Amino acid sequence: MKDKKKTNSEYIIDTLRFNRDLRSPEITEKVSELSGRDMKIQDIASILAKLSNSDKCDLGFFIQKKKTQRGYTYNLVPEIFELEPEEIYDLTRKTGPNRFTLEEAIEKNPDLKRHVKASRLKRPAARTTAARGRPPGVSATARQGKIPKTTSGTKLSEGALQTIVAQLFKGLSEKGLNINVNVSVRFEGVTGN
């Protein structure tokens, strides 16, 4: 079976696995040696920017970027070396079959957890719905518009509802605002005359 060709990201990871405190030009030189191709520093710098950004790539939690007088240097945190190279490569991917995930990396080496933002770690399944990742009971519209959802079971008398609607329209007309309002009302137990 023929080995698959490595990506530039994988060559950068290999370079960081075997060297410490490297700047972009040094990483570019090492990647050129490993890949057998002449690499441009701007291409490597662009990939490094993505790899070291934890918002774009899970590996970013484990790349240390330090500012020095000569520019930024890059290192992998020591705890990452307990993972296999292929597992580290997978941390650069967002999708794929049988991909090694951030959660699996932390399970394999719990010391990695100290480098990961608490907000990034998966929440217990009971707190969000699996299908959309939002808290149960919050509609997509409420979530997108950051509109609070009223609690279910709130009952208003007919007079109270009329007062609320009248005050709403009065306030809008006084301000001279042009506002679209969507109101959903569900009547329960209403019988006809």
Image (spheres, helix red, strand yellow):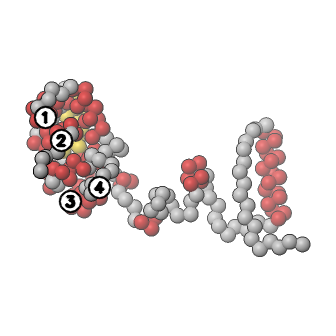
Category of crowding for the residue at label 3, using alpha-carbon neighbours closer than 10 angstroms: few (below 14), some (14–19), many (at least 20): some
Question: 74 or 90, which is in the foreground?
Answer: 90
Q: Residue at 17% x, 55% y: name it.
A: 83
Q: Which of marks 3 and 2 is in front?
A: 2
* Residue 35 badge: 1
**Mark 4 element type:** loop
Q: CA–CA distance between discs 1 and 2?
A: 8 Å
Mark 3, residue position: 109
Q: Mark 1 and 2 residues: CB-CB less than 8 Å, in contact? A: yes
Depicted 45 relative to depicted 97: above or below: above
> Can residue 190 be spotted in the picture?
yes
Image-quadrant location for residue 54: top left
Q: Earlier in the sequence, mark 3 or mark 4?
A: 4
Depicted 7 relative to depicted 83: above or below: above
* Residue 6 badge: 2
Category of crowding for the residue at label 4, using alpha-carbon neighbours closer than 10 angstroms: few (below 14), some (14–19), many (at least 20): few
